[in-house]
Amino acid sequence: MLTYKQIRSNAAINTYIHKADESLVALGFTEHSFAHVSRVAETAKYILETLGYPERDVELAMIAAYLHDIGNLINRIDHAQSGAVMAFRILDNLGADADEIATITTAIGNHDEGTAVAVNHVAAALILSDKTDVRRSRVRNSDITSFDIHDRVNYSVNNADVKIVEDKKVLSLKMTIDTRYCSVMDYFEIFLNRMILCRKAAEKLGLQFRLIINEQQVL
């Protein structure tokens, strides 16, 4: 069976991730490279392991997470769908099982908030992991005076922790933000749809979703 370790060490896959991120640099987006996909994979692992899903399902979620943004190589628009098609070809060529390819590509094709639906537990874990990766180190722009709202929101985040609490009934995203760079309203201006998607993904896993910013529950 294909492993997450094999995917991470595949030279072609890593080239696609690197080149996709280069395109996003040119478009002015925050970091979507190895730090992002690795963090998303580890968060997906944490979520499904904590909830007691089978080890193989955890592995598939990590593979989906590592591959989820390769569609940016083609275009930012509809990158979830193009990424799913790319992942299908890659995994098929690597000899992956058809059922597992279906699970991975379904998750990738359903991770972007414009079209996403948490159709299964792997997709739900990917959505939650991707949308909660908000951090200062994702900002590429070194000139604070020229930050756009995405830069401000990410730069303001001092800490963001995903935890499953209250006897595995609640998934919380607990954040501390520096309001010198971003207000809570700024955060919601660009992340409200993502947080609603996180709530639906959490419900797919039998969880409630809570967003806590500066010790105040806001969702």
Image (cartoon, rainbow, N blue to C red):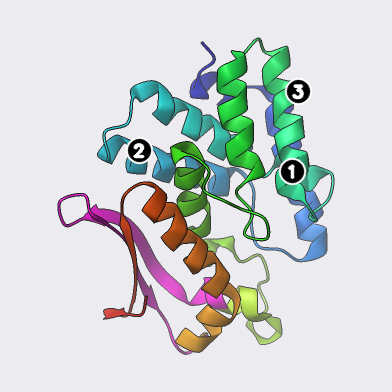
Q: Is residue 169 magenta?
A: yes
Q: Is there a contact, CB below 8 Å, between mark 2 and mark 1?
A: no
Q: Which one is in front, 40 or 190?
A: 190
Q: Position of residue 76 (x, y in %)?
A: 79, 54
Q: Position of residue 111 (x, y in %)?
A: 60, 49
Instruction: Look at 64% across and 52% down and name the residue there.
Output: 32
Between the residue at mark 1 and the residue at mark 3, the CA separation in whole angstroms equals 13 Å
Q: Amino acid at mark 2?
A: Leu
Instruction: Look at 44% across and 87% down and name the residue there.
Output: 179
Circle 1 sits on which residue?
81
**Picture quadrant where residue 29 is located:** bottom right
> Tag 3 or tag 1, which sits nearer the N-term?
1
For the C terminus, the image quarter is bottom left
Q: Amino acid at mark 1?
A: Gln
Instruction: Look at 66% across and 65% down and name the residue there.
Output: 140
Instruction: Look at 78% across and 41% down and name the residue there.
Output: 82
> Tag 2 or tag 3, which sits nearer the N-term?
2
